[in-house]
Amino acid sequence: CPGGRLVNGTECSGRVEIRHGDTWGSLCASHWDLQDANVLCHQLNCGYAESILGGAHFGEGNGTVWSDIFHCEGTEPCLWDCFRMALGNPACSPRDSASVICSDSL
């Protein structure tokens, strides 16, 4: 499962970053939910999603903030298997970046 990672925390917690082409960027928190986070935790071998935190809990990051919307059931093997809408670039502040704490990080 390429294209998803957690940064600035532990191996299994942190700010969500996704990759478009060669560009990694934070993910906007506005549509990020526990089902989406569950898929990412599972994809990273980190169990399931314990909690999702908005408000740049793991720092704001720099560069791009993607505003993709993932519609995951929570059981998909990879984030990219979920139905996804890329919204282009409506304004999403780095302060609104998505993050997650997976069960295996505790």
Image (cartoon, rainbow, N blue to C red):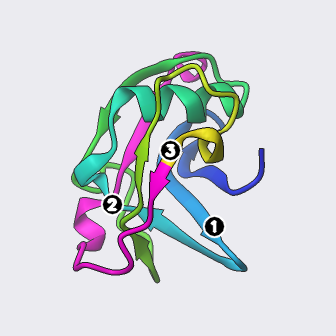
In what element is the residue under mark 3?
strand
Q: Amino acid at mark 1?
A: Arg
Q: Is 22 drawn above or below residue 59 in the view shown?
A: below
Q: Is 57 drawn above or below residue 92 in the view shown?
A: above
- Residue at x-position 30% and y-position 71%: 94
Q: Nearer the viewer, residue 7 or 84?
A: 84
Q: Quadrant of the N terminus?
A: top right
- Residue at x-position 23% and y-position 53%: 30
Stretch of the chain drawn in magenta: 84-106
Which of discs 1 and 3 lies nearer the camera? The answer is 3
The percent coordinates of residue 11 (x first, y second) are 66, 38
Report how far apart the C-alphas of labels 2 and 3 lie in the structure. Answer: 16 Å
Nearer-N-terminus badge (1/3): 1
The percent coordinates of residue 15 (x first, y second) are 46, 52
- What label sits on residue 19 in the rendered view? 1
Q: Is 101 drawn above or below residue 2 in the view shown?
A: above
